[in-house]
Amino acid sequence: MSLIGRLFAIAFGFLFASLAAGLVVVGTMLFPELSDLAGGPLDPDALNIVMGFGFIFVSGFALLPALIVVLVTEAFSIRSALAYAIGGGLVGVGCYLGLVPFDPGTLQFDGIVRRHLEIMTGAGIIGGLVYWLIAGRNAGLWRDPPRRPLPQHDRPPAPPAPAPQVPPSPPAP
């Protein structure tokens, strides 16, 4: 795979990872009653608008941390789904902590809501796994030279085909 093709795969993977993470964030923050499946149907137009805002929010805040994770995994050819899930979780935590006020006097974050931290971590994990499905499974393959078939004279000779087995003829009476 060429480098240009790999860059398109990375962009495509980040796009869908941000969409999945935005869906998780929006779905859990704005519709906590969705865990109760007895509820009625949701308005699809409102859901589309909210999902669009969630996508913009997640992709804007997660671009730089996610790019760092992508660069590390590409540089070291890390193709493990667990690595992308952990990296996505760290990106989710980092994005949440970036929005929470930090008090330098006490060296503590003020106003951390545990549920929100869990939601952002879960959204990061889902985003990391979606990225792995699209682009992470082939991390670092663009550096490997393409495999070329051996020329005909360098190939080992094909083994001879086995002779067909002829059943013995019955004895004459």
Image (cartoon, helix red, strand yellow):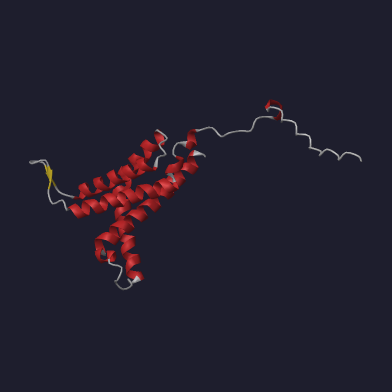
In the image, taking residue 116 as reference, residue 18 lies left or right, namely: right
Measured along the vertical axis of the image, is residue 42 above or below residue 173?
Answer: below
- Identify the residue at horizontal 29%, vertical 46% (top origin): 89
| Residue 37 coordinates in the image, percent (x, y) | 31, 68
Q: From this viewpoint, which residue is outermost toward the left?
A: 105
Above or below, 43 relative to 136: below
Taking depth in this image into account, of 50 and 88 the one nearest to the observer is 88
Query: Residue at coordinates 27% horizontally, 48% vertically from top-left?
Result: 92
The picture places residue 159, in percent across and down from the top left corner, at: 72, 30
* Residue 57 occupies quadrant: bottom left
Q: Of all residues shown, which one is farthest toward the right?
A: 173
- Image position of 11 (left or right of 159): left
Residue depicted at 28% across the width and 64% down the height: 35
Q: How many marks?
A: 0
Residue 31 in the image, given as x and y percentages of width and height: 26, 65
* Left or right, 148 with reference to 79: right
Q: Residue furthest front?
A: 173
Residue 46, percent across and down? 32, 69
Q: Residue furthest bottom?
A: 40
> Which residue is located at x 49 percent, y 37 percent?
142
**52 w.r.t. 75: above or below:** below
Q: Quadrant of the C terminus?
A: top right
